Image: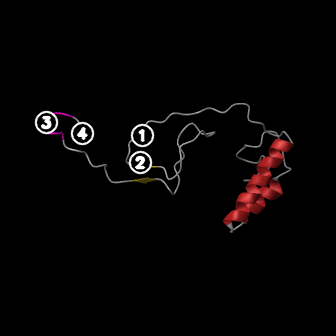
Amino acid sequence: MGINGGHPHTNFSHYDKIDRLIEAARVEILPETQISLWEQAQIRILDDMAAYPIMYTKQCYARRERVDYGHPLVATMALYPQFTEQTRLVAKPFARPPSSTGNPQ
């Protein structure tokens, strides 16, 4: 599978100006350096106008308190919350018994 539009086809414009940055980021073991390489690639894409986001949407997600995504839920290009290695299920929240007076606590 190549980054230059090979199978599967994801580079429909055949833009190849960042292939070296992508390859370097894929093999980089230092997280800070890898992030920097991905940032450089994204900035280059925008500078060259190879791809330009024309719309961002704010998504609203319903979820149980037991699901901890491990990151803030913010707008994303995906249409679903991002599940990562940080996502986990936590113990059920403690349910407070009803008040004996009938008044909520």
The part of the chain drawn in magenta is 98-103
- Residue found at x 72% / y 47%: 7
Work out whether mark 4 precedes mark 1 in sequence or the reverse, and give the earlier one.
1
Q: Which residue does the numbered mark 2 point to in the structure image?
A: 67
Quarter of the view holding residue 63: top left
Mark 3: which secondary structure? loop
The one of 54 and 99 positioned closer to us in this rendering: 99
In the rendered image, residue 101 lying in the magenta stretch gets the answer yes
Badge 3 amino acid: Thr
- The disc placed on residue 13 is none
Alpha-carbon span between mark 4 and mark 2 = 25 Å
Quarter of the view holding residue 15: top right
Alpha-carbon span between mark 2 and mark 3 = 33 Å
Q: Which residue does the numbered mark 4 point to in the structure image?
A: 105
Alpha-carbon span between mark 3 and mark 4 = 10 Å
- Whether tag 1 and tag 2 are in contact, CB under 8 A, the answer is yes
Alpha-carbon span between mark 1 and mark 2 = 7 Å
Q: Is residue 52 visible?
A: yes
- Whether tag 4 and tag 1 are in contact, CB under 8 A, the answer is no
Left or right, 45 with reference to 87: right
Q: Which mark is nearer the camera, 2 or 3?
A: 3
Mark 1: which secondary structure? loop
- The disc placed on residue 101 is 3
Looking at the picture, does residue 95 appear above or below residue 60?
below
Badge 1 amino acid: Arg
Badge 4 amino acid: Gln
Find residue 31 and report its horizontal and vertical position in percent. Answer: 67, 64
